[in-house]
Image (cartoon, rainbow, N blue to C red):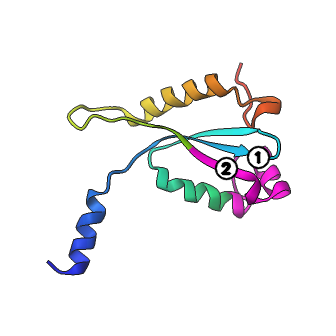
């Protein structure tokens, strides 16, 4: 097997992990809680913040104000999926997200989310 084929095979075998992540502003301790099917997409989230296109306007404004060095990205929970059982990833991620929203309460002065009534 040539090197290119080996690399392709290795890439296919890499396990994709999703779950819940938290972006914390180290200046004021405000938090943004997000979910993803693939933690590798967090780089995309950083990119949207760097380019000023993130969908959360408050987080985006503070990113611009404080700079990227003021923020910390953390994976807080990995979605566990059994290989021999079908799991609705979207539904399971939503449950995990709700759990972390309840736990961290990232609303108002504590975060970048708006509480839904």
- Which mark is first along the chain, 1 or 2? 1
- Residue 54 lies left or right of residue 100; in this view the side is right
In magenta stretch: residue 73: yes
From the top left corner, tell me how far across and down residue 115 is, in percent: 72, 25
Secondary structure state at the residue bearing disc 2: strand
Q: Which mark is residue 35?
A: none
Q: Which quadrant holds residue 66?
A: bottom right
Work out which residue is located at the far top of the displayed protein and give it: 117
Write down the residue under mark 1.
26
Q: Residue at x 63, y 62 (%)?
A: 47
Toward the front, the furthest residue is 26
Mark 2 and mark 1: Cα distance apart in space = 7 Å
85 in the magenta segment: no
Residue drawn where x is 81% and y is 50% of the image: 62
Q: Residue at x 44, y 30 (%)?
A: 91
Give above or below for 95 relative to 16.
above
Residue 76, how many percent across, how many down?
54, 38
Identify which residue is drawn at 76% across, 46% down: 26
Q: Residue furthest bottom?
A: 2
Of residue 1 and residue 85, the one placed in the foreground of this image is 1
Please say if the residues under marks 2 and 1 sit with CB atoms less than 8 Å apart. Answer: yes
* Residue range (magenta): 49-74
Label 1 residue SS: loop
Query: Which mark identifies residue 72?
Result: 2
Question: Does residue 16 sit above or below 112 in this rendering?
Answer: below
Q: Dot 2: within a 10 Å radius of its alpha carbon, few (fewer than 14), some, or many (20 or more) residues?
A: few
Q: Is residue 9 left or right of residue 91?
A: left
Q: Quadrant of residue 56?
A: top right
Q: In this rendering, is residue 62 above or below 82?
A: below
């Amino acid at each position: 097997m040539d090197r290119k084929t080996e690399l392709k095979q290795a890439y296919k075998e890499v396990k994709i992990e999703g779950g819940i992540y938290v972006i914390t502003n180290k200046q004021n301790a405000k938090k943004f809680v997000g979910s993803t099917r693939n933690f590798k997409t967090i780089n995309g989230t950083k990119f949207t913040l760097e380019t000023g296109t993130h969908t959360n306007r408050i987080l985006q404004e503070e990113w611009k104000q404080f700079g990227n060095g003021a923020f910390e990205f953390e994976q807080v929970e990995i979605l566990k999926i059994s290989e021999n059982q079908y799991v609705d990833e979207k539904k399971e991620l939503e449950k995990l997200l709700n759990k972390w929203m309840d736990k961290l309460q990232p609303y108002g002065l504590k975060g970048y989310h708006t509480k839904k009534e």
